[in-house]
Image (spheres, rainbow, N blue to C red):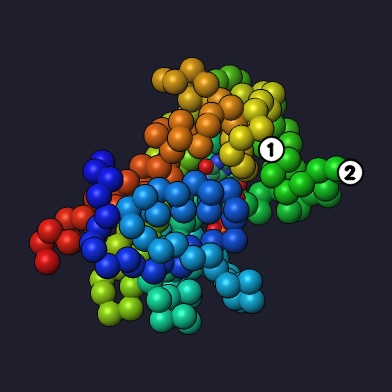
Amino acid sequence: MSSSPLSSRTQTLILATRNQGKVREIADALRHFGFDVRPLPDNFPEIEETGSTFEENALIKAHAVADALGLPALADDSGLEVDALNGAPGVYSARYGHDIPLLPGEDDDARNNRKLLDALSAFPHPHTGRFRCCMALVRPGKADLVRHGVWEGVIVDTPSGNNGFGYDPLFFDPELGRISGELTREEKNARSHRGKALRRLIRALEEEGSAG
Ligand code: ITT
């Protein structure tokens, strides 16, 4: 991946996400490529994710923001698919634990992880699965760009590591021999579903630039 800016003119881009874990992983990489990355305005209304696929939801979020603000918007829809659970939590990954009460001191991510471990306790090891990410870039007056990334792994029984977010403390990368929650941001981006989708999107933009 080259590190040269995509064009001599800085492109403003709204990150259409409220997930600060995603913002941390996406923003640096895009700035590196010459984008003026801006967060979603605080008062932007909640966007309902009514799609049944990562791609549908990514496009819903990016269109909601780009159409309302008249600026290019990049959305990420992502989640964890576990084979023993027939692909759950999938597109419901962020909301997976919402049907059980929070324990004292627990946040949303910890509750999701607890529910996942409970669900998997009935199944034999290894608990194979994968993270999936779809990135959608919507630009007023231009064609939408959509790219995907996948990260294969195994769900472990005991959370480990304080880095990343979501299911990272439970996701083991067998090729790397490490748990996602223990990786630095750079190490995770090099392997992750999000890093792959983002690199593919940047490559598509570079190809557009060289074709135009
Ligand atoms: P936005 O819609 O505002 O972007 P969200 O967290 O609701 O934020 P999604 O609907 O795409 O986003 O759900 C993604 C969930 O999948 C996320 O909350 C985590 O639970 C999980 N997830 C996705 N990528 C992950 C990663 O890199 N590491 C750990 N968990 C991840």
Relative to 59, say whether 190 is above or below: above
Residue at the front extreme of this rendering: 8
Residue 10 on image: x %, y %: 32, 66
Picture quadrant of residue 70 = bottom left
For label 1, count other residues whose C-alpha is less than 10 Å away and answer few (under 14), some (14-19) or many (20+): many
Q: Which of 28 and 90 is in front in this view?
A: 28
Q: Which of 130 and 62 is in front in this view?
A: 62
Picture quadrant of residue 56 = bottom left
Dot 1 or dot 2, earlier in sequence: 2
Ligand 1 under 8 Å from disc 2 Cβ: no
Residue 37 on image: x %, y %: 44, 62
**Which residue appears at 33% of the width and 67% of the height?**
11
Name the residue beneath numbered marker 1.
113
Residue at the left extreme of this rendering: 211
Distance Cα–Cα, label 1 vs label 2: 15 Å
**Which residue appears at 64% of the width and 76% of the height?**
43
Quarter of the rendering occupied by the C terminus: bottom left
Name the residue beneath numbered marker 2.
104
- How many numbered callouts? 2
Mark 2 falls on what kind of element?
A: loop
